[in-house]
Image (tube, rainbow, N blue to C red):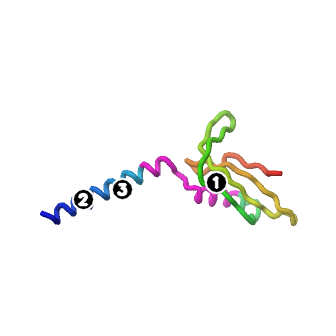
Amino acid sequence: MKARNIVIAAAAGIAAGYVVKQQLDRNQSVTPEKALKKAKETFKKQGPISGSWIYMKPEEYEKNGLLYHAYRGGVTRNMDGENKQYEFYIDADTGTVIDSAETA
């Protein structure tokens, strides 16, 4: 009888863990680390980058009348011996770069 209770408790724990994981995945589809990796891959298509950063908490970002749940980050590139910095916003749900601009 005790072994049966242990098996039932373990099964219930696994089921609860699965449900919690599904809810967390639904709330945050792309982790900040994955978002930064995708952004770096996008910037590397036009040349090497020498540094990068990302804020770990997503924020609201509006572009063209649409509101996004997005991560803000940046990359540094060395072009012609000069460091140039770019800031970007990447959608926290899809991992798509929404906007990027060179900073002063």
Residue 5 image offset from top left, x and y in percent: 18, 60
Residue closer to the observer: 101 or 57: 57
- Residue 34's label in the rendered image is none
Q: Residue at x 22, y 62 (%)?
A: 7
Residue count near mark 1 (Cα–Cα under 10 Å), binned few <14, some 14–19, many ≥20: some
Label pair 2/1, CB-CB below 8 angstroms = no
The quadrant in which residue 21 appears is bottom left
Amino acid under disc 3: Gly
Residue at 80 percent across and 51 percent down: it is 103
Spatial separation of the CA atoms under disc 3 and disc 1: 28 Å
Q: Which residue is drawn at the image coordinates 83% and 62% (left, top)?
A: 83
Q: Which residue is mark 2?
A: 9
Q: Residue at x 49, y 47 (%)?
A: 27
Q: Which residues are magenta?
A: 23-42
Of the residues shown, which amino acid type is indicated by label 2? Ala
User: Mark 3 falls on what kind of element?
Assistant: helix
User: Which of the two labelled residues, at mark 3 and mark 2, occupies the earlier sequence position?
Assistant: 2
Left or right position of 10 against 88 = left
Q: For the residue marked with disc 1, what is the amino acid?
A: Tyr
Mark 3, residues whose alpha carbon is within 10 Å: few (<14), some, or many (≥20)? few
Circle 1 sits on which residue?
55
- Side of 70 relative to 2 (left or right): right
Q: Earlier in the sequence, mark 3 or mark 1?
A: 3
**Residue in the foreground of this view, choosing between 45 and 68:** 68
Secondary structure beneath dot 1 equals loop
Q: Main secondary structure of the magenta part?
A: helix
Q: Quadrant of the N terminus?
A: bottom left
Q: CA distance from mark 2 to mark 1?
A: 39 Å
Left or right relative to 30: residue 74 = right
**Residue at label 3?**
17
- Residue 43: % across, % down: 72, 58
Above or below residue 75? Residue 64 is above
